[in-house]
Amino acid sequence: MYGGFYRMYLRILFLFTILVAPFAYCAQELPLHKAVEKALKDNPKLSSQRAKIESEDALIASQYALSSPMVGISELKRGNTTTYGTVMQKVEFPTKYFLKAAKQRRKASAEEQVLEQLKLDLRSKVISTYYAIYAVQHIIQLTERDLGRLKEVSRTAESKYASGKAPQHDSM
């Protein structure tokens, strides 16, 4: 009875080791701080957010300036045809320009905070994944050690059965 159980358990552990081991071990060990650096450097969401921050920063100076003037040509027909050009410039109260620029600065600052949040979220995901992989690797090492011990027990039991030193009812 116990011999069949051990063999079945041994086969299950062997299959588990064969199936899981190739995925758990990588060709080169990567320290945690390097994994975080690489993720922060190569992430497309972070690159996109940085570009968004640059565009928001570039808009700050435009908020201080006057809006674009409107240029037009008109024609008046009252017996005589008169063509004249017009130039119009909208001028707001001066403090409005400062307030618009301050608003744009706060918007750029908010985008920077979004970038920092994205960095923290990514760092958290990398760290949890890193330690999950570490745990799987440790489980595989323990399983391999157990597998070695089971092989040893199996060899001992088989040699006892072969020599006749084990009771006969254990083999059933």
Image (cartoon, rainbow, N blue to C red):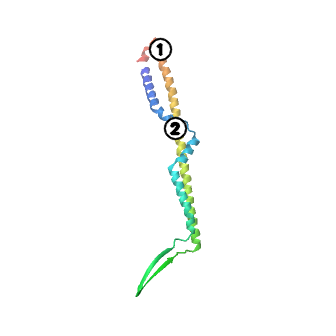
Q: Disc 2 or 1, which lies upstream in sequence?
A: 2
Rendered view: 65 above or below 114 = below
Residue depicted at x 55% and y 61%: 58
Residue 95: x %, y % from top left: 59, 72
Side of 12 where 119 appears, left or right: right
Give the total of numbered labels. 2
- Crowdedness of circle 1 by 10 Å Cα count: few (<14), some, many (20+)? few
Viewer-proximal residue, 150 or 69?
Answer: 69
Instruction: Please name the residue that numbered disc 2 is placed on.
Output: 133
Q: Is residue 95 above or below residue 23?
A: below
Across and down, in percent, residue 169 comes to 42, 16
Residue 107 shows up from this direction: no
Q: Which mark is residue 15?
A: none
Q: Residue at the spot x=51%, y=32% of the render? A: 139
Left or right of 75, for residue 69? right
Residue 42 can be seen in this image: yes
Q: Is residue 80 left or right of residue 67?
A: left
Along the line of sight, the residue nearer the viewer: 81 or 59: 81
Between residues 147 and 75, which one lies in front from this camera angle?
A: 75
Q: Residue at x 49, y 74 (%)?
A: 70
Check if mark 2's residue and mark 1's residue have beta carbons within 8 Å.
no
Residue 105 falls in image quadrant: bottom right
Q: Is residue 99 above or below residue 170?
A: below
Query: Pointer 1: what residue?
Result: 160
Element carrying mark 1: helix
Query: Quarter of the image containing the N terminus?
Result: top left
